[in-house]
Structures are given as C-alpha cells and as structure tokens.
Amino acid sequence: MLDPALQALAEGRHGDPFALLGPHGTIVRMLLPYASRVELIGPTGVSFAEAQHLEQGVWEARVDAPTAYRLRVDWGGVSEEFEDPYSFGTLLSDFDLFLLSEGRKHLLADCLGARILEIDGVPGVRFAVWAPNARRVSVVGGFNGWDGRRHAMRRRDGGVWEIFIPRLPAGSLYKYEILGPHGLLPLKADPVARQAELPPATASVVAAQLPAVMRRAPLPDDAPLSIYEVHAPSWMRHHNGACYDWDQLAERLVPYVRDLGFTHIELLPVMAHPFGGSWGYQPLSQFAPMPDMGTPDAFARFVGACHEAGLGVILDWVPAHFPSDEHGLAMFDGTHLYEHQDPREGFHQDWNTLIYNLGRTEVKQFLIASALFWLEQYGVDGLRVDAVASMLYRDYSRAEGQWVPNIHGGRENLEAVSFLKELSETIAARVPGALLIAEESTAWPGVSRPVAEGGLGFTHKWNMGWMHDSLHYVQENPIHRAYHHGQLTFGLVYAFSERFVLPISHDEVVHGKGSLLGKMPGDEWQRFANLRAYLAFMWAHPGKTLLFMGCEFGQPTEWNHNAELPWHLLQYAPHAGVQGLVRRLNTTLAENPALYQRDFTSDGFRWVIEDDAGQSVYAFLRQGAPDGKRVLVLSNFTPLPRHNYRVGIPEGRWEEILNSDAMEFGGSGVGHCGVRESEPHPSHGQPASLSLSLPPLGVLYLREL
C-alpha cells in the first residue's frame, strides 16, 4: 500500500508534486501510469539504475549519489527517452512573481502561457498559469495521453503554477486540468496561449517564436487618417467559399486598400473566438490570433506586408466582456477569478457574456498585457476599444434594481475608469504614437483628453452622434430634408469637444439595417448620387474617417459574414463610380492639408451657409495652417440642380478639385466650374462671392489658389 501522500499523488489530489517526484537525495521518484519498465540512464545513454513499480504508476529508483539522469520508459513495446520534468528547479524568478502580484508584468506572454526555451541545454516548453484557488493544476495533451497525473505543476507565490516539459515541440496541443476547491473542472484552454486550435476544437497550441515585425513611425498628430474597416474572413474568399489565409489576404487586400488611398486597415477582432458569428467580439484568447486564417507568424507577415505598403493596422480589441464557454475563463480555477461573482456586475444581459472584474489587479494586468502584446509583439499601430460605454456605466442596459451602485452610490464604474486610464497611460509610455480609439456612445467627458488633464487618455473617439444624425438625414426623402436640416449642422456644436473619428462601420449594415446604399431614397440614379454626396460630405467634415468594406462600391445588400463581398458588381458603372469617388476623396484628402490638419480645433472650420434649409444646401470652409490654402465645400442634398447659386467666399481665385456629380463617378456632370475668380459682391459674411451651379445630390470642393 502507498503511504497517504503517494496515494494522493497517484489519484491526482496532491497539490505539491515536486515534494515527492524527481530526485530526493538517493531516491528518484516518478509517476508514470501505464509504464511497464523504467530505467535511469546517464549522459552516455547507459542505464545505471532500474526503477521499481510501487503501486498505481508510482516508480522509485535508488542511486548511490545524486547525479544527472534521463528516463528510459517502456510503454509496453514502445520505448521513449526524455529528461525528467521534476528534475528541474523553479522556473519563474521571484522578481517575476513580485511583478505579477503587483500587476506590473506588462510582458505577460513572456512569463505565463507556453514558452519555448532551453534550460541547462535541454530544449522544451515552460508552462505557467495563474490559478490561485486551485488545489492542483496539470498540463495535459497528446504528449501524455491527456492524463492529468503525468505533468502536475509546481505552485509558486501568488497562485502561479509552473512546469518545464522537455523536448516538447512547437505545435503541440495542450490544456490545463484543474482541481478546484469543489472538484475537477472541465479542461481549460490557456488564458495566455499565443496560438489556438481551429474551432470547434478548443485546445491551446504551443506557438513558435514570432518573427520580428518592424513598427511604423508614429502618425503625426496633424496627418490624414482614413480607415478601411475589414472583417478578414469575409472580405474575399476562394471559389469554394473557403476563407483566404493571411498570406493570401495580404496579396489582395493590401494593394487594394493602398490603391484606394486609405491610410489604415482596421480589422474586426482577430483574437481567437469560438463562435464565428460573433465576428470576433466574443473572444476567448486575448493573446492568440484566430486560427481560421493561419498561424501567428502568418498574421505577423500580414502586418509586415501592410507596413511595407505604407498602411497602418488597427485591431478591434474587446476588454468589456468574454463568453462563458466552459473551456475558457469562466470559473477558471473553480472560482469567479476573471469575472464578478454577482451577476448584477458580472453578467452582460445584452450579449449573454461575462464581465471582467476590473477591480482585481491581476485581471487588469491580463488585459493591459494583451493590448501591449498586439502593439509590441505584432507591431500593430493601434487598437479600437469596443463597447467602452458598457464599461463606464454600472447600469448600462440594466433596469432599476439590476445593478450595483459604486461606493459613492453613483452609476459610474470607477474600476473601469481606473482601468482605462491605466491602459492609456501604459500604452502612451511604452508605445508612443500608438492609436487608442474608443467606441463610446455617450457624452462621457474627456474620452480623448489626456489623463493628466482629467480625461480617459484615448487618442480618438468614435463620433456616434454624428453617425446617427447624418444617416437619419440622408435616409429622409429629399422633399422632407428641409425639416431635418439641423441633423447635419448639430454635430458641429460639439465637433471639437473630442478628437473624433466619423464611423460608418459594420454595425450600420447588419441586423436589418440594410446596406449603406440601401438606406438612400429615390430611384437607382438618386440612390447612387445620394451615396456619393454623403461620402463627399463625410470626407470634408471635421474628424477622421472610417468606412466599412463594401460601402466603398455601394454594396446593395446587408453584409453577410458567411460570404465574400459582391465583387462582381464592380463591372457596373454606378458601383465602379462610387469606388472611383472614394479613391479620389482619399487622394484629395492627402493633397489638401486644409481637410485634415485642424480636424480637432474650431479654427479649422467655418460655416458659410448653414441655414438654407429650404434648398437643403450647406457650405463651409476648411482651414489648415494659417498660410495654407483653404477649401470651400458646398453640398446640395436635393435632386434639383441649383443654378446661379451665390455663395460667399474669400477674395481670390478658386479651382474645383472634386465634384461628386462628375460623370466619371456616374453623375450628371453638373457643376463643373474649373478655375473661377471671386466676384466683388459680398455675401454670407464674406467679402466676395461666386455664382455657381450646384449639382443635384452633389458636393463640390473648391480650393483657394
């Protein structure tokens, strides 16, 4: 009979396997269920001791003196030689453990997860995981028959468990078997895994070392920013419906976006997620790219290809919530470790997901380390943080009595505020110039103001108010737009209160909302003209621009994540015309600093005509540097051309640089005015004016010469 300690070890109940296994003076003890013979061999490969089987897979060998050894194990006809995992000392340094406990270990993936390295000349994988309430943690995989008795881990301070498994190669599948306070848990994927198995399988994968990705120089604050938002698996597909991998996507997407003149590609979350229909917004792997499109090094090559083409890469990133799949973070060590215990704080009713406990130091560290991992290890240029509003308010989407007030009795989530400030300050310090963009739909003050000035520290914020108002306006029949004129002017009341991005995102073309083209009223010609006018108005409006894939050529139907975009439509002139206009808008933006240099300050914008509701005409001036050339923007949102329309203008010569109604874009060609000299007739508060033909459902840009 085994003594109680060895009995507990054999039954997987012992929480300190290193106290019993490995070399202990002249005894070497092993737990090798199903082995038929075990020998100790020396450096020359010669056996010098044979182990005896005690009971239930426990083996012991006696040696004359402590010595280096390897194990030769006969598994019933199959022989294997390997170093004893229990012959290695502690792996993580005390300083690492101290930083982990303090929440200051920013390079978390260098410390936790599966890391390929060499110890004492022996290659292998170091595993480490945070599970403070576990009674026992083991690494399991095909390499040990998914048997949790084989590689039980050593517990270190702070509830971190570790083990080194020699000779394990990259690509090995693994999970953690955890004995929680109340019993054995479902096998868990690694929270800090750098590679994940292809769904519906759920294992983690030992990842190879990433290739180096060069970071781009930070974007100057006054540079143009034009973002093309992409759902990578559905942008373009093979004829059989299979997704492109990252290398194939780089060959097609990167030159396409560069040709259209966008400055950045923004990817819907690429972090591994179990359900494709979530589009990545319910991620389980905050450190691993989705395996559907290739390995981590393939994604790194994609980022590198973007940078070589002069394109920045922004990733959507989700720290607000996570899915409750049993192999994931939920009840990770048998307790509410990553999530709140109280469902009024820890369960998201809208998405049936769990909410991170941001009051816990280790959870904040986990998320901040994830953000830094994508920025530093993959060299991406920015993150767009999803669902910030849901983080800021404790009563977000909750009825009275379904939420817990903060310590002051208020609705603000003070822990989330602290987390977002720490996140932004850490990124600014470690990755200067990285973009940090908030999807925040409320009037929370100072989202894009520095933390030192009382803000949250984001570099930009999505302008959800402008998006809702402007889309509501263009969906109105033009005959009714006179009664909704203020929906395009109201945004300028607060346009400079934040550093705004104007988002026409994936959220506006799904869930029954129709496509962007489908929102436009009128016959086919008017719908395309409306779309072109709306895009031209958007590109000239203060703020940076974001457009979801398919909108750039007038996709007529809602986005379908299970199919590629309808690329065949580009053979038809109206769709090609919209695409041509988007290309010209980006070129015009890049060539005219007046359209971007002062996007965030009121001195870069001036209304010329804001009150002509009867004719649905708007006119404004954009200004860059004080000595730069101004741009006059005129918009006519009715299908009637406005001939001899007089507009006030600064004195001088002006040239047309863009007309959304140009025939090359599918328009009627009304309004082309070439180069014009201002006339000495004051109007609209300006010392001079021009008499112009405003195209129907069209926008003109005129540049000062």
Image: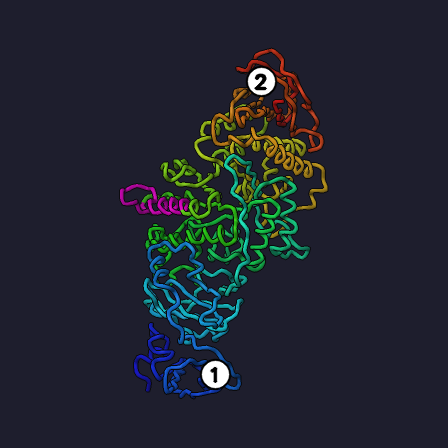
Sequence-wise first label, 2 or 1: 1
Image height of 40 relative to 617, above or below: below
Residue 410 is situated, as x and y percent measured from the top left of the image, at: 30, 41
Q: Is residue 159 visible?
A: yes
Image height of 56 relative to 412, above or below: below
The amino acid type of the residue labelled 1 equals Val
Residue of label 1: 73
The amino acid type of the residue labelled 2 equals Ile
Q: Quadrant of residue 691?
A: top right
Image height of 623 relative to 309, above or below: above
- Going by the image, does 111 lie left or right of 621? left
Q: Residue furthest top?
A: 681
**Residue shown at 66%/36% (left/top)?**
578
> According to the image, what is the colour scheme of the structure?
rainbow
Q: Is residue 13 visible?
A: no
- Element on which disc 1 rests: strand
Residue 343 is situated, as x and y percent measured from the top left of the image, at: 35, 53
Image height of 438 relative to 325, above or below: above
The magenta segment: 401-425
Residue 42 counted in the magenta span: no
